[in-house]
Amino acid sequence: MTWHVQSELLAQYARGDIDEAHAFSIEAHLPSCAHCRAQIAPLVDDARLAQAWEVIEERLDAPRRGPLEAGLARLGVPGHVARLLGATPALRLSWLLACAIVLAFAVLAATRREAGLYWFLVLAPLLPLAGIALAYGPDVDPTYEIGLAAPMRSFTLLLIRALAVLVATTALAGLAALALPGLHPSAAGWLLPSLGLTLASLALATRISPVVACGSLGVLWMLVAGAGWRLAQEPLVVFGATGQLACALLAALAALVLIRDVDSFDRRGDLT
């Protein structure tokens, strides 16, 4: 090394009063010049140096954002909400892929036999229900304890995750419905049942574990659907006008219960 940085430039660099061109040149020179490093060391403000190290450590220790979290952040979702949503098991690619495969088999079945359409309509509302069961709780959520420390109520977090799961699974089921043979308005018959079951599961979650609530409703839905298929003269009676009205009433009743009992979720203290 045949040259050293002038003392005045080193002092300006230490104060942060230097232009970018000289700063880049000095930063490229310092790692290979012990003399200049020794000259600048006494000039650096200790408080500023400590602050710089804090920023570096924070950047290094910060967890990497996943694709879902990064995408939500680009859409303007607040950082802490995006992180809590990104940790939702039911929004992970593997789970959504499993949902897509299940729907694909249901669509394939619908192309082969008449009962296939019926069971597609039965299956589609169960997907958001299963997703909500996996959305929040000590047994299913690896970030459950972090969620408890989040700057929001536990039930608010569950609602946010439930909405995200509902949107994702509804989009998948909607795309699958478009692939059904002989597209007919009856292919949308799963929408109201899906909404009714989702709201009912959230209403029950104010009293019991979301897993138990969603599992119980899922079994009940399968029993009702199976009974409708076996006993009714019209196979699609569950998805007809009467069935749709019943699902709408269920959704309205569940919404009222949800509004009234929302505080009981946080007062319970646990979800086991």
Image (cartoon, rainbow, N blue to C red):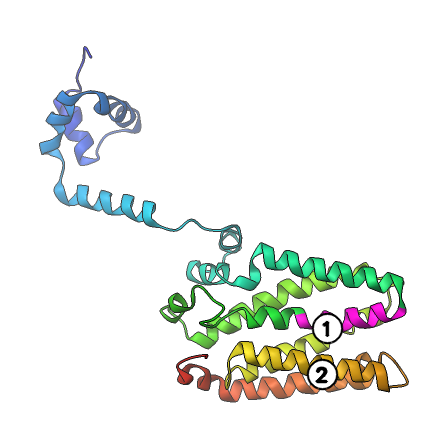
Residue 109 in the magenta stretch? The answer is no
Three-letter amino acid code at the position of disc 2: Cys
Work out whether residue 242 or residue 140 is closer to the camera in this orientation and state it: 140
172 w.r.t. 213: above or below = above
Q: Residue at x 17, y 25 (%)?
A: 9
206 w.r.t. 185: above or below = below
- Horizontal arrangement in the rendering, residue 74 relative to residue 219 (left or right): left
Quarter of the image holding residue 235?
bottom right
Mark 2: give few (<14), some (14-19) or many (20+) Cα within 10 Å. many
Image quadrant for the C terminus? bottom left
Name the residue tied to disc 1: 191
Name the residue tied to disc 2: 247
Quarter of the image holding residue 152?
bottom left
Q: Residue furthest left?
A: 42
Q: Secondary structure at mark 2?
A: helix
| Numbered range of the magenta stretch | 114-126
- Horizontal arrangement in the rendering, residue 195 relative to residue 107 (left or right): left
- Horizontal arrangement in the rendering, residue 228 relative to residue 67 (left or right): right
Q: Residue at x 50, y 73 (%)?
A: 158
- Tell me residue 237's x, y (percent): 84, 82
Q: Secondary structure at mark 1?
A: helix
